[in-house]
């Protein structure tokens, strides 16, 4: 009889120990350390920082709480925003031009015409090649977009939970 009680007590304590050793999940009033980064589609870093936030503190990072709520340590969240869809009304199709490689290298002095290479035009504007297509003869046609960069940029966001301090 005592052996059964001892086994049940041992099993209960084992389960309790396993639950205590489980992964930390974010709860109310926890202090959460996060790494935040957002980049352009060519991986150029626009902004990057590491900060701590207290859950339900309603600080300047309150918008992140909804994203990391119930996360565990080392969880990572990432998403993309296509600004071209948001600013579609500001795109002027006459400012999207197709040029041959010879035009880019000889007239616009672009040494290596690849996607996201800068194109300087009359020392006033510096825009980029957004894509390379094939023309009707099968040659490369370089699409240079002279619209505002926000109309064709895609941003990638990343948030990683690096530490959870329980309160």
Image (cartoon, rainbow, N blue to C red):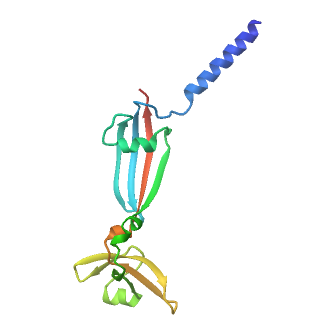
Q: Taking 145 as reference, is 20 above or below it?
A: above
Kindly identify the residue that appears in the image at 68 percent across and 19 percent down. 11
Question: In the rendering, at what x and y percent does residue 163 appear?
Answer: 44, 37
Question: Is any part of residue 112 visible from this angle?
Answer: no
Question: Is any part of residue 54 visible from this angle?
Answer: yes
Kindly identify the residue that appears in the image at 56 percent across and 28 percent down. 21
The quarter of the rendered structure image containing the C terminus is top left
Q: Is residue 97 left or right of residue 125?
A: right
Q: Looking at the picture, tell me which residue is in the foreground, 115 or 150.
A: 150
Kindly identify the residue that appears in the image at 34 percent across and 42 percent down. 61
Residue found at the far top of this picture: 2
Q: Taking 129 as reference, is 58 above or below it?
A: above
Occupied quadrant, residue 54: top left
Occupied quadrant, residue 58: top left
Q: Is residue 155 left or right of residue 19?
A: left
Instruction: Please count the marks in the image.
Output: 0
Question: In the rendering, at what x and y percent does residue 123 appear?
Answer: 22, 80
Kindly identify the residue that appears in the image at 31 percent across and 71 percent down. 148
Q: Taking 53 as reference, is 93 above or below it?
A: below
Occupied quadrant, residue 109: bottom left
Q: Is residue 8 left or right of residue 69?
A: right
């Amino acid at each position: 009889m005592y052996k059964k009680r001892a086994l049940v007590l041992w099993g209960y304590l084992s389960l309790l120990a396993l639950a205590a050793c489980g992964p930390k999940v974010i709860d109310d009033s926890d202090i959460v350390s996060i790494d935040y980064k957002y980049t352009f589609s060519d991986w150029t870093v626009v902004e990057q920082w590491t900060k701590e936030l207290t859950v339900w503190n309603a600080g300047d990072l309150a918008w992140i709480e909804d994203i990391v709520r119930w996360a565990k340590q080392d969880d990572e969240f990432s998403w993309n925003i296509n600004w071209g869809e948001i600013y579609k009304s500001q795109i002027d199709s006459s400012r999207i031009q197709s040029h041959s490689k010879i035009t880019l290298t000889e007239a616009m002095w672009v040494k290596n015409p690849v996607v996201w290479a800068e194109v300087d035009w009359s020392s006033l504007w510096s825009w980029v090649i957004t894509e390379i297509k094939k023309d009707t003869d099968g040659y490369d046609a370089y699409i240079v977009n002279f619209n505002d960069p926000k109309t064709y940029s895609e941003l990638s966001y990343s948030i990683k939970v690096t530490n959870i301090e329980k309160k």
